[in-house]
Amino acid sequence: MAYNEQLSKRIEASLHYFPKDISEAITQKRMFGGIVFLYKGKMAIGVIKQDLMVRVISAKMDETMKKEAVRPMDFTKKPIKEYIYVGAKGIKTEEELQFYIELGLEHALTKV
């Protein structure tokens, strides 16, 4: 199944809000049947089917799981640690999308 290319384009358009040293360090790679965005080689966010996939630091998982349209990433039929899916209802606005991009980048920054 193809991934939501419109969502991928929204992410790409949002990257210009970040400082150049961050936005230029982000690359894309096909994974999980979709596309993921990596910061210096570390996965931050992605688009899997129709959902936004986000890596979240452990300390923010409980709080993030309470947000609208958020669920554990269960790509392998069981939740994967520090990964979430966000459905369309959770990223209706660019501000909501930006929040999750920043959350994913925060996780990636802890890994570089």
Image (spheres, grey):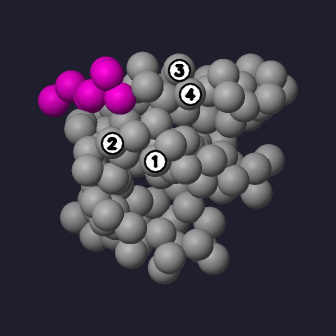
The part of the chain drawn in magenta is 1-7
Task: Name the N-terminal-most of marks 4 and 1.
Answer: 4
Element type at mark 2: loop
| Contact flag, marks 1 and 3 (Cβ < 8 Å) | no
In the rendered image, the vertical position of residue 84 relative to residue 13, given as above or below:
below
In the rendered image, the vertical position of residue 100 relative to residue 69, given as above or below:
above
Q: Quadrant of residue 8?
A: top left
Q: Position of residue 86 (x, y in %)?
A: 34, 53
Query: Which disc, if any, is residue 14?
Result: 4
User: Is any atom of residue 21 visible in this view?
Assistant: yes
- Disc 3 to disc 4, C-alpha distance: 4 Å
Task: Report the residue marked by disc 2.
Answer: 92
| Contact flag, marks 1 and 2 (Cβ < 8 Å) | yes
Element type at mark 4: helix
Is residue 2 within the magenta segment?
A: yes
- Disc 1 to disc 2, C-alpha distance: 7 Å
- Disc 2 to disc 3, C-alpha distance: 15 Å
Task: Name the N-terminal-most of marks 2 and 3.
Answer: 3
Residue at the (45%, 60%) spot, across then down: 83
The residue carrying pointer 2 sits among few (fewer than 14), some (14 to 19) or many (20 or more) residues within 10 Å by Cα, namely few
Task: Report the residue marked by disc 1.
Answer: 96
- In the image shown, does 80 or 108 lie closer to the viewer? 108
Residue at the (42%, 20%) spot, across then down: 9
The residue carrying pointer 3 sits among few (fewer than 14), some (14 to 19) or many (20 or more) residues within 10 Å by Cα, namely few
Q: What quarter of the picture does the N terminus occupy?
A: top left
Task: Name the N-terminal-most of marks 1 and 3.
Answer: 3
The three-letter amino acid code for the residue at tag 2 is: Lys
Task: Report the residue marked by disc 3.
Answer: 13
